[in-house]
Image (cartoon, helix red, strand yellow):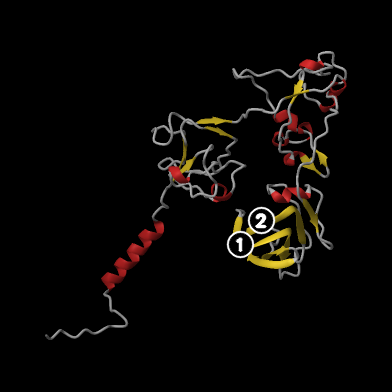
Amino acid sequence: MNTPAKTAAPHPVRSNTQRCAAIFLLLIAITWPLTAATYYVDYSGGSNQADGLSPRTAWKHSPGDKNATDKPKAVALVEGDTILFKGGVTYFGEIEIKASGSKENPITWDGNSAGTFGEGRAILDGARTINGWKPVESAEAVLGNPRWKEIMFADLDVDLSSNFDFDGFVLHRDNTVARQAPWQRVFLIDGQKKVLPIAQQPKPKDVFYPDLPEDFYESTHTLADTYPHKIYYEEGTKGNRTAPLISITFGGPNAPVVQPMNGGKISIDLARPTAITEMGFTLFRPASTPAPEHIVLFADDKEIFKAKVDTSTTQLQRFPLPASVEAKKLTFQLLTSDPKA
């Protein structure tokens, strides 16, 4: 059976009409808007390491929540995106909305209005239940108060990083409202959602300002340092005193400065040997300040991984290690070829 011979043309010839059509299609592809997505948030059962694109892979935190990590922290919302909160679940936290949609394609935060994710409506709540109330042990613990047996106390986990500056606390009256003193951010309510007044003895000097520091007693209850690891600059490295070095473990706008840029090292002595599978960092710097080109991870003083820094992003940059390594000491080193850095 004879078949017609085929020839291959290495450079296909197109007419002008075909070339124009190809260019037109390319322009359409370039100008077409990004596809909107629906992200699912389940505060009780979600994971920030999931993709957030289905009820089964929901995130714990919403984008814009300062406590968000991993995927919801890194996502860049676009026009038409929807953040869908699981119905019947109470979301505890504060969400700052920075992304903007358009009149035609808004960005929507939805509390399960269609009833397709969970049961009923979602609840966004900035409060949380205070557990662990304990009775005081003696009248001396509350400065001789005769009703000491009726007094109870609880420890609160309060983020103090925004109040710490140059080895001291910044009081909210000495700065902006965004840097309120820790006690100014605590409001107690009962089960009926009624605000509980703060009992003070002696009465405040100025009833309009019942939270002045000089009107408070100094508690005999000492706060314990429960952070199990040790963080320190390696010899030959230094930083500023704007924030405590421990803030390098959670980032934020108060992350400490590391100098020199080329060769500066920070180490963490872990409480016990731990398996390390990946490294990550977030870059905080003014636009006019040079950035390191690489960050090197050492485990027990042995170089394990060298990561190239993406200087165009302030999102968390994560790098899986070539192999899991067990170590008790982790060291991060900055590297740059810029002699002026």
Query: Quarter of the image holding residue 158?
Result: top right
User: Of marks 1 and 2, which one's residue comes earlier in the chain?
Assistant: 2
Q: Residues within 10 Å of mark 2 (few under 14, many from 20)?
A: some
- Residue most toward the top? 146
Q: Which mark, residue 184?
A: none
- Going by the numbered disc 1, the residue's amino acid type is Asp
Secondary structure state at the residue bearing disc 2: loop
Kindly indicate whether the residue at mark 2 contacts the one at mark 1 (C-beta within 8 angstroms): yes
The residue depicted at 65 percent of the width and 57 percent of the height is 275
Furthest-left residue in view?
A: 1
Q: Nearer the viewer, residue 20 or 313?
A: 313
What is the quadrant of residue 285 in the picture?
bottom right
Q: Is residue 293 visible?
A: no
- Residue 310 got which mark? 1
Quadrant into which the N terminus falls:
bottom left
Question: Looking at the picture, does residue 155 appear above or below residue 47?
Answer: above
Residue 107 point in image, percent of width and height? 46, 41
Q: How far apart are marks 1 and 2 (CA)?
A: 9 Å
Residue labelled with disc 2 = 283
Looking at this view, is 106 or 75 the one in front? 75
Element at badge 1?
loop
Look at label 2 and name its amino acid. Leu
Which of the pair 308/277 is nearer the observer?
277
In the figure, is residue 68 to the left or right of 260?
Answer: left
x and y percentages locating residue 197 in the rendered image: 71, 17
